[in-house]
Amino acid sequence: MKMTGANIVIEALKREGVKDIFGYPGGSVLPLFDVLYDAPVNFILTRHEQGAVHAADGYARSTGRVGVCIATSGPGATNLVTGIATAYMDSIPIVCITGQVKTHLIGNDAFQEADTTGITRPITKYNYLVKDIKDLGRIIREAFYCASTGRPGPVVIDLPVDITLKQYDYKYQEKVSIRGYKPVLKGHPLQIKKAAEMIEKSKRPVLYTGGGIIISEADRELKKLSDKCQIPVTTTLMGLGGFPEDAELSLGMPGMHGTVYANLAIQKSDLLIAVGSRFDDRVTGKIEAFAPEAKIIHIDIDPSAISKNVDVEIPIVGDARKILIELNKIIKKSDSADWVKQIKSWKKDFPLKYEETAAGLKPQYVIEQIYKLTKGDAIITTEVGQNQMWAAHWYQYTKPRTYISSGGLGTMGYGFPAAIGAKIGNPDKVVVDIAGDGSIQMNIQELATAVSYEVPVIIAILNNGCLGMVRQWQEMFYKERYSYTCLDNPDFIKIADAYGAIGIRVKKQSEVGPAIKKALKSKKKPVVIDFIVDGFENVFPMVPAGEAIDRMIGGMA
């Protein structure tokens, strides 16, 4: 059946099961938006392209489905760049469709022309410039396949406006074959056997797990392995929720702001079993001093991630879930009773803690109350900085896809639009964005989106009047010279009111619970809670940059 390029895009998206699309219109995508006007998809008009791509990202992380966004050429496409890089660093499957000038104008510095494929090449898993309408259907099919298989990631389709106006006989392509792209899913049996034998001989094993557990849905197999062999589990920021934090063998997060017991366990272990994690610098600290007594097994679907940062004794390339299933079949119960006893002792001696003082409301208390009143069943998104770390420390994650944060790129302004995406993908879940007063202002215009589409997310601003994490580093390492980190903030309640949202201000502990309860009752309007918190509260424990991870400040007294 002959269709215009714009109709082929919509038909192909329908065939991929796309129900929700985030985006912003413009001149080069007008034919596409004209078709969208009647299309049976839920299109969410954000107020900025960056909001659209973060929303698509939050949608993907919380549902496991590919997130989709659309923007026009030039500034529309370049406004997506931060969001694309955010998704790339955290291996998130999104497809971004960008408008482009007419094919014969490409390279002529035409109005709103930018080299989108060139700009996004280093931050995408793959990108396409559609030059012929004959390729359009195939490219969209490949884009979804590429984004969601192997190590997931963002794919960009740059679409010249004249292609959307041409006509072609579209046929859906069932089978996808991309030359040179064949992700390995099944682990090598001999390597898995070697891993089982090494684990059985270990006296002090630690499972170090990351976002790969969540992507491959390997959480049950991970719990099974941990229980069977009594192996403690530490979970990176990207992996939170991949192992229940209320389990006895949970160590929480490792690294720069990890728990004392997670870092001590890694440093004293004789075997580190890394699953779906990439040994990034926030976890390893001083790489030469990382896990000095441990042999390392590394399970990952991306062969380029193995032995990239640390040397590995046993590499296993493949899908984490499939490999853990095979490992659990053959591994025997091992004896690590003394090691588990030591872990319990560390957990008892060095718990996460904070001091309640008269200085003001503590942000940790706020998050504890959010956890209590949502019964631990909410999806939490975060911005980046102190709010991100406190949200990781003080809300216990027991299920995958419940902690949504920009880990690799560390993108301020991510959490709120990601919350909108998560709520649209999970309408029955409570979604809370834990924000800072600095980061929320980077995409606060999306309040209009949330109000317009009746998306009742809760925005919990931990308002300390500064860029908290940078200020903390200035306090600790730059002699308290607070260079451009103190903020003169607007009245967030008036802003909420102006957009049509609900605004609540909280200054003392007794007001925290009632404010959260009121927010939870809102079924259509977003709620902004402005928690005025202690401006000099810091995140501890903390490993100074470049130090070994057992050289922690705070948390060991």
Image (cartoon, rainbow, N blue to C red):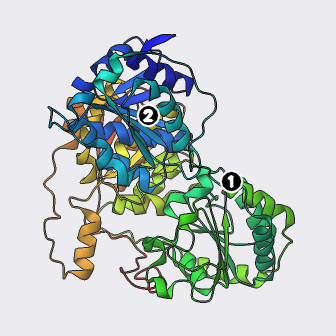
Q: Does residue 511 appear in the picture of this structure?
A: no
Q: Is 503 drawn above or below residue 81 in the view shown?
A: above
Q: Are marks 2 and 1 in contact (CB under 8 Å)?
A: no
Q: Look at discs 2 and 1 and give the one toward the viewer.
A: 1
- Closest to the observer, 525 or 326: 326
Residue at the image point whose x is 23% and y is 35% from the top: 106
Residue marked by disc 1? 185
* The one of 405 and 69 positioned closer to us in this rendering: 69
Along the viewing direction, whichever of 131 and 289 lies nearer the viewer: 131
Per the image, label 2 sits on a secondary structure element best described as strand
* Residue pointed to by mark 2: 68
Which of disc 1 and disc 2 is earlier in sequence? 2
What x and y, as percent, mark residue 324?
74, 60
Name the kind of residue labelled 1 in the image.
Leu
Residue 369, visible in the rendered structure: yes
Q: Residue at x 31, y 17 (%)?
A: 31
Left or right: residue 123 versus residue 369 is: left
Residue 334: % across, % down = 83, 77
Q: Position of residue 2 (x, y in %)?
A: 47, 11
Q: Is residue 308 left or right of residue 199?
A: left
**CA gap, disc 2 to disc 1?**
25 Å
SS type, badge 1:
loop
Q: Amino acid at mark 2?
A: Val
How packed mark 2 is, by other alpha carbons closer than 10 Å (few <14, some 14-19, many 20 or more), is many
Q: Tell me which corner region of the image, top left, top right, bottom left or bottom right, holds residue 548.
A: bottom left
